[in-house]
Image (spheres, grey):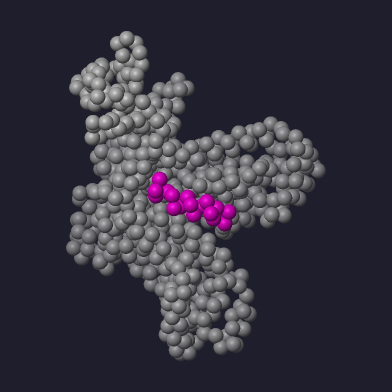
Amino acid sequence: MLGLFDPVARSFLLLLVTAVDRVLTPIQRRVGIDRMGYIFVLPNLLIFGIFVLFPMLLNFYYAMTGGTKLFPADRPFVGLGNFENLFDCEDFLSPNSCQEDLFWRGIFNTIQYVILQVSGIVLFSLATALVLNRRIVARGFFRSVFFYPVLLSPVVVALIWKWVLQHEGVLNAIVEIFGGESRRWLLDTNWAMFWVVFVSVWALMGFYTLILLAGLQSIPPELYEASSIDGANTWQDFRFVTLPLLMPTMFVVLVLSLIRAVQMFDHIFVLTGGGPGTRTQLMVQYIYTTGFSNQIQLFGLSAAASMVLGISLLILTLLQLRVGNQSSLA
Amino acid sequence: MPADRISISQFLLKRSGGARIDLSDVLTYLYLTLGTILMFGPVLWLVASSFKTQAGLVKYPPPLLPYQQVQVEVEGYDKPLPLFKVTLGDGSLRELAQVRRVGIEAQMVDPANPAAETIKVNIRQREPVEEVRLAWENYLDPLVELENFDFFTYLKNSVIVTTVATVITLVINSMAAFALSKYRFKGRDAIFVLFISTLMIPITVILVPVFLVITSIGWKNNLWGVIIPGAATPTGIFLLRQYMLTIPDELLDAARIDGASEWHIYWRIILPLARPALAVLAIFSVMWRWNDFLWPLIVLSQNDYFTLQVGLNAFQGELQIQWHYVLAMTVVTLLPITLVFAFLQRFITTGIATTGMK
């Protein structure tokens, strides 16, 4: 960005822009003004087509082929074989009875993680937004405090907490001061999921706090004046003015955090690597390991699993549209 | 917006009964204090720990500040010697430097009187003398000589990916948004719906085929393979289109009457007017790209092409985690984004709050 102020870069940019103009003006003369829309949309459409649309279609083909070769022509067609493998279970509720037990563990872990993480985020970002919306000193500072972790990269976030949570770490020292028992938090099957949820709530809630705060500040103050004339107390203010008017914003927060939680990968991958055992391994990690990090790269199985993930996201999105429409009609 | 805020605060002021502090205020500030500790504490702890030596890091319970054993220069010895507080046989305390240690016996010398004979003491009778000193070597060693962590290469790669990807995203997204908001052409709405419908389809769902495309082009272990696939963001198109719809068409028509070409209109009128939306998208894009992890992890498998995040992950994943280096490099990685935030925090927080709503 700073380069724009540099005269050399500036004149180079000017040259580039003029050159593009030279190329586009004759085209404009031929196709007319309105069809210039195609020209402007073209670069984005090309990248979108090659790296999103085409892969989406190709994914279906991958999901129906086997073997370990990457190029589609080298891959034997297996029909629904990959899906049969994924869904080969004696009892869908117990991952041990499934052929791809890691996939099912991933699904169950993801469901648990999503429920815990989304409720954590909604709860804490709402509480924080309500507090920040009060008359407080240094609101800008506190708003930044809660937002700061959002900017940190997942790898950094995970390393910060890995250091705090390690066996000779500061958390155990604090726990011992209060008479508790020190643990290997991230290797403890009872605690690993808690910390994985905790860390991602810590890292992400600031974003949703900002959205909710904006929602709170857009509530017209006259409504509170009216309710105070009616003799409403603080709780009634919250219950009958704040909450109903905040509902659309809450809904946005719920949907965004839900869709992000289903795709969670990076925090956990660095923090626990999916462990202890497979306790915190989620769906996306299964897709990644199966297709890319295992010795034998099962691209077909990975693609099939990613389609299951995609369909789950689709269902969530459709559900959101439905509920969203209903709540806007009501 | 500020007017609303003032009236809300005046209103709250009235409700809580003038300037009196009541229970809810106490709870509010308690929440904020605890929150600040919880949000900043771990980061500060990381920074404080990163200045401890390897020996200092294994101490438990961990001391708050980075202590190091004092080293003294003693005449007649090449290297500085570690200083200890020694309880002698007669019960007196003296500060002595250790020459060498044999089993449980240590040979000590008085730094003030190096010519005298060495004193032999049991190692249980000595305590290291410590002072607060920052272990800058944690930062300097990896920057110059660590074999498996090439910081400057990773930094260069991360900067290239972030800036090039952001520029490309801004240009192609704004062009597409311009087309979708200001022109009438066949299939326009279909294209828009196509773009937007992928808002909820992340790259995680199509990892394998995108990897094939990248490999076919020859972009495996190439920064372009990281930059291009995510460049056509649906978020950016949506954001910019919504903003450009508010730019009056009359402006464009006036420019056309003056003989401006369509490209000229895009470059000279639309882009400058859409600056606030472009800035928000730029912030988003920088955040996405700087922190991106899964896709670079798949595309980049050679050390020379690692971005900071991938390099840091590989470094911390080694068999023997060298925490003193890992912590220092983590601090270096979070530093740029922290500085940017410190300067732009108001802009970033308001920008995200206002667009997140839509």
Is B225 left or right of A179, judged from the image as shown? Answer: left
Q: Quadrant of residue B134?
A: top left
| Residue B275 drawn above or below residue A242 | below
Q: Quadrant of residue A50?
A: bottom left
Do we see residue B241 in this rendering? yes
Residue A99 counted in the magenta span: no
Do we see residue A161 in this rendering? no
Residue B345 counted in the magenta span: yes
Q: Judge by depth and name the residue closer to the eye, B86 or A36.
A: B86
| Residue B312 drawn above or below residue B172 | above
Tell me what residue is drawn at x 46 percent, y 71 percent: A6
| Residue A35 drawn above or below residue A107 | below
| Relative image position of residue B297 (x, y in whole percent) | 31, 53
Q: Please report the bounds of the magenta region as a residue range.
A: B331-348
Q: Quadrant of residue B241?
A: bottom right
| Relative image position of residue B57 (x, y in whole percent) | 35, 33
Q: Judge by depth and name the residue closer to the eye, B331 or A293.
A: B331
Main SS, magenta residues: helix
